Amino acid sequence: MNYLLKLVFFRFRNVTCFAVFFGIVLLGFQANASEKLFSLKIGPTWPSAISTSWDGELLYGSIIDKKVGFGIAADFLWNTSSVEIDTGTGLKRTIWDESSYMFPIMGFILFDPVPQSMIHPVLKFEIGYNSLLYSRSQDTGIAASGYYYGLIIKIGADGLYNLGEQTAIFVGLDYQWADTRNAANASGYFYRRDMSGIGIRMGFRFLL
């Protein structure tokens, strides 16, 4: 019974967070924004559960007075690894391989305090629903292959360099909280994959 109550609370809390935040995002799209914002970035991330991964993200939304932006973010993180042994005959054999593909959908809000400066900081907050496809060729008891899900939260800071009035390049740091889990089995047990970690980002931003 306690497990059921915790599960209901967990899902209700997540749905509430999503509803409130995406409500703010929709208000941002409806606001009388002077411009649309488009951003593309990529870089390495170091999640707790796996080794160095690559993470790409696309942001689209509205920005008001070049200072406050709202919108939707689509993210894709991937990692593949394997262990090989030498058979002694010049041939190698893979004893296990592992892959992780994470694709959260998030809403974001950002703040650009001094957009008129050639070099300026941008602070960003994102929250959304996280999906993870994990597979491993050998069962180690650490985690089962399959679909994982959960809440994801990201905070980040970028340093932008304006190439013109509407275009900028940037580099920045992100930290994500992403503790995913799979569906419980008949006995109520489940696995977790902690995908939280820090990342480095580089990319372009366009105001349309």
Image: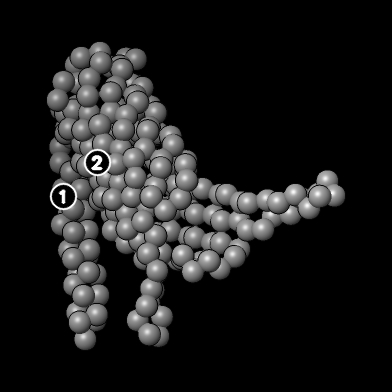
Q: In this view, does 126 lie above or below 160?
A: below
Tell me if label 1 and label 2 are in contact, CB under 8 Å: no
Q: For the residues carrying marks 1 and 2, which lies nearer the camera in this image?
A: 2
In the image: residue 42, left or right of residue 28: right
- The image's colouring method is one colour
- Of residue 33 and residue 172, the one placed in the foreground of this image is 172
Say whether residue 196 is visible: yes
Which quadrant does the C terminus fall into?
A: top left
Q: Distance between the residues labelled 1 and 2?
A: 17 Å
Q: In this view, does 192 lie above or below 195?
A: below
Which quadrant does the N terminus fall into?
A: bottom left
Determine which residue is flagged by label 1.
24
**Residue 36 appears at what percent x and percent y?**
27, 34
Mark 1 or mark 2: whose residue is earlier in sequence? 1
**Residue 98 appears at what percent x and percent y?**
56, 56
Q: Residues within 10 Å of mark 1 (few under 14, many from 20)?
A: some
In the image: residue 84, left or right of residue 135: right
Determine which residue is flagged by label 2.
155
Callout 1 amino acid: Ile
Residue 205 occupies which quadrant of the picture? top left
Callout 2 amino acid: Ile
In the image: residue 138, left or right of residue 88: left
- Of residue 198 and residue 43, the one placed in the foreground of this image is 198
Say whether residue 106 is visible: no
